[in-house]
Image (cartoon, helix red, strand yellow):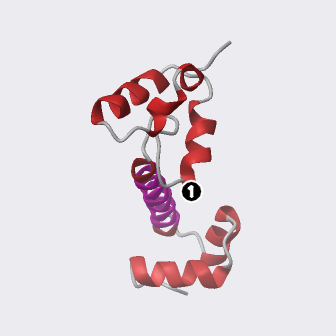
Amino acid sequence: MQHPCESDPDMWFSEKAEDVTQAKEACGFCPLRAECAELGDNEEFGVWGGMTPAEIRSAKRFRVIMLEEMNNTHIRRMRAEGASVSAIARELGLPRKTLSDRLRRLTGLAA
């Protein structure tokens, strides 16, 4: 099976907006999209997994922010339920000191 980028490889590195748009659309149903985006993580040019390098970096930052917010929500909930810093640290796999520092920043509640 031929992947979209194999049919016209130059389109994925074009500077023309029309080519970039077509390359992104062609990536839409490719089964290697996620792997391709990972390959483009450190690239400067091209379309990788349907995204430009700037879009890949932005998506990566967004994922990190969302993961941090999920962890912070979990920490707040456990703390409100009376869980100790040590118990929360064990559950999240964090060093107690790291969690204490994060709690201090989040709520001023470090023990």
- Foreground residue among 34 and 69: 34
Give the residue pinned by disc 1. 42
Quarter location, residue 33: top right
Asked whether residue 15 is in view, the answer is yes
- The crowding category of the residue bearing disc 1, from other C-alpha atoms within 10 Å (few below 14, some 14 to 19, many at least 20), is few
Where residue 102 sits in the image (x, y, percent)?
A: 50, 78
Name the residue nearer the viewer: 36 or 85. Answer: 36
Q: Quadrant of the N terminus?
A: top right
Read off the magenta span.
56-78
Which residue is farthest top? Answer: 1
Does 23 appear in magenta?
A: no
71 w.r.t. 47: above or below = below
Q: Is residue 8 above or below residue 48?
A: above
In the displayed structure image, the side of residue 90 where residue 41 appears, left or right: left
Closer-to-camera residue (57/9): 9
Mark 1 secondary-structure assignment: helix
In this view of the protein, can residue 109 be seen by the observer?
Answer: no
- Disc 1 marks a residue whose amino acid type is Asn
**Taken as a whole, is the magenta stretch helix, strand or loop?**
helix
Residue 37 coordinates in the image, percent (x, y): 55, 41
